[in-house]
Image: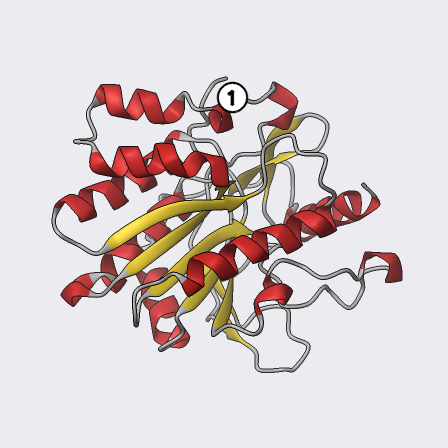
């Protein structure tokens, strides 16, 4: 619990700006996707650390999958959803994406949480991302999507959860077709290669990404110049980002780096969260 409180405080402290910050503009994700592709190079495991609950990040990820899957390239997407949802995800990918299929997908246990636990991972924007994978697959692309998280409501503490998610991702990565690439969307703390230097000693436990360093990992933090995201900080609500001037992507090769790359979307806005 202490670690969760510190992580939440650190992430929110990095993000919060003035309460009356200007609304985020409609963000163009294409340029950001191109930056990630340019800098990630041949990396076969790209972990994308996000702010939960935005409209733009699922669009960015959909764009990345579309680009990476051109010319018969195999791409798999990992989402921060419980492994138990994978049967429903596979069933949806085989469907024609009609209203009945979409309703069957969004009425599985993952999509039903109490109001104070709605951390932003459940949104119509995420459903649209899953639909984009189904549509690409229907066109003949070699794409897929699966969850890698522990069960919702599990009593597993944060350290055990990060280790378990990494174990699931190891298994999924090792099962990839030869030469396939895997994209993983996760919270930006899970995506850290190492914890921040200013974390208290008792919070220096390993993150999910730190368990994946034996794989060809490329860790990307998805930042934005302005806007809002969704977080649960008594109560769950939209929180503003610090407004920044336009800037280039930030690369790091330091041995103790938190991320390999930080990119900046023009803006973020809160997505359309699904109702319980």
Q: Residue 196, located in which quarter of the rendered image?
A: bottom right
Q: Is residue 196 left or right of residue 38?
A: right
Residue depicted at x 23% and y 61%: 69
Q: Is residue 189 visible?
A: no
Q: Nearer the viewer, residue 158 or 223?
A: 158
Q: Nearer the viewer, residue 53 or 183?
A: 183
Residue depicted at x 61% and y 37%: 239
Vertical side of 215 occupied by 95: above or below: above
Residue 241 lies, in percent from the top left, at: 58, 47
Q: Quadrant of the N terminus?
A: top right
Residue 63 lies, in percent from the top left, at: 28, 54
Residue at the far left in the pictured view: 139
Residue 71 lies, in percent from the top left, at: 15, 67
Residue depicted at x 66% and y 47%: 161
Q: Is residue 116 left or right of residue 82?
A: right
Tag 1 residue: 112
Q: Under tag 1, what secondary structure? A: loop
Question: How many numbered discs?
Answer: 1
The colouring scheme, among rainbow, by chain, secondary structure or one colour, is secondary structure
Q: Is residue 201 visible?
A: yes
Around disc 1, counting alpha carbons within 10 Å, would you say few (fewer than 14), some (14 to 19), or many (20 or more)? some
Residue 272 lies, in percent from the top left, at: 42, 28
Residue at the far right in the pictured view: 201
Vertical side of 150 occupied by 47: above or below: below
Q: Is residue 96 left or right of residue 36?
A: left
Q: Residue 180, located in which quarter of the rendered image?
A: bottom left
Vertical side of 78 occupied by 175: above or below: below
Residue depicted at x 65% and y 42%: 18
């Amino acid at each position: 619990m202490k670690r969760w409180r510190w992580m939440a405080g650190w992430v929110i402290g990095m993000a919060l700006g003035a309460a009356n910050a200007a609304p985020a503009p409609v963000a163009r994700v294409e340029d950001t996707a191109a930056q990630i592709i340019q800098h990630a190079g041949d990396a076969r495991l790209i972990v994308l650390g996000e702010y939960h609950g935005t409209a733009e990040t699922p669009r960015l990820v959909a764009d990345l999958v579309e680009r990476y899957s051109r010319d018969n390239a195999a791409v798999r997407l990992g989402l921060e959803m419980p492994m138990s949802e994978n049967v429903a995800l596979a069933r949806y990918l085989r469907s024609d994406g009609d209203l009945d299929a979409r309703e069957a997908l969004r009425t599985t246990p993952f999509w039903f949480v109490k109001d104070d636990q709605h951390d932003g991972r459940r949104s119509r924007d995420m459903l649209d991302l899953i639909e984009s994978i189904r549509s690409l697959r229907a066109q003949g692309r070699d794409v897929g999507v699966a969850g890698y998280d522990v069960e919702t409501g599990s009593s597993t503490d944060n350290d055990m959860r990060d280790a378990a998610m990494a174990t699931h991702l190891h298994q999924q990565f090792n099962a990839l077709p030869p030469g396939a690439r895997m994209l993983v969307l996760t919270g930006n703390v899970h995506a850290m290669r190492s914890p921040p230097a200013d974390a208290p000693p008792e919070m220096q436990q390993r993150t999910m990404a730190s368990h994946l360093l034996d794989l060809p990992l490329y860790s990307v933090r998805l930042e934005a110049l302005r806007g809002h995201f969704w977080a649960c900080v008594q109560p769950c609500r939209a929180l503003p980002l610090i407004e920044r001037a336009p800037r280039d992507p930030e690369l790091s090769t330091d041995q103790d780096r938190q991320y390999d790359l930080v990119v900046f979307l023009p803006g973020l806005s809160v997505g359309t969260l699904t109702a319980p």
